Image (tube, rainbow, N blue to C red):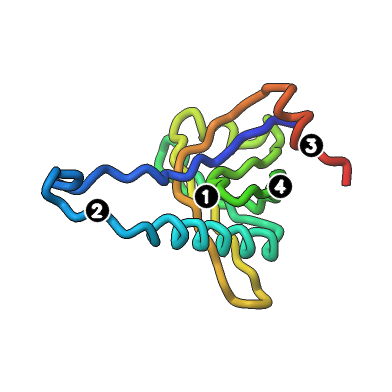
Amino acid sequence: MILYSLLNRDKKKKAKGEGKANETPKAKSAQPQKTQKTKSVHEIVRAAKTATLTTRSADGTVQSRVMIPATAFEESQTSLIFFGNNASEKFKELPENAHVNISFADVDSTYCASYIGTAKVSVDRGLISQYWSNA
């Protein structure tokens, strides 16, 4: 088994002119809103229990596969960790194009969540031991 994570592209570039000395500071309520949104996404991920990982091969073909997240979510966490078979096609595709999409759908509530970012393959035995569960 190999471990890889989807890193959410959460870092946004500053808008032109943002942060100037004469600018009114942003309201402090922006952080709680982001925290609440992250919490809501985590609730959807927990309820959905499975995800669809979409990758793109070198020839441009899009492939989607069902995956199960391996992580326990922390309030501020914006990355996901999955285990997979290193002989599968997805592990051949990721080095060629690491841009992926992970989608979750909670059929009971009809809510969904989608992560867009880059995947990173890791064979770090320490991380594998940390997240692996026989349950």
Looking at the rendering, which quadrant does residue 41 occupy? bottom right
The Cα–Cα distance between marks 1 and 2, rounded to whole angstroms, is 39 Å
Q: Name the amino acid, label 4.
A: Ala
Looking at the rendering, which quadrant does residue 49 occupy? bottom right
Residue under numbered circle 2 = 25
Q: Position of residue 34 (x, y in %)?
A: 45, 57
Circle 1 sits in a helix, a strand or a loop, which is it? Answer: strand
Mark 1 or 4: the one toward you: 4
> Does label 1 or label 2 sit earlier along the sequence?
2
Residue under numbered circle 4 = 72
Say the numbered circle drawn on residue 54. 1
> Does label 1 or label 3 sit earlier along the sequence?
1
Say the numbered circle drawn on residue 132. 3
Q: Name the amino acid, label 3.
A: Trp
> Does label 1 or label 4 sit earlier along the sequence?
1
Q: Is residue 12 left or right of residue 80?
A: left
Dot 4 alpha-carbon crowd within 10 angstroms: few under 14, some 14 to 19, many 20 or more? few
The Cα–Cα distance between marks 3 and 2, rounded to whole angstroms, is 44 Å
User: Closest to the observer: 55 or 129?
Assistant: 129
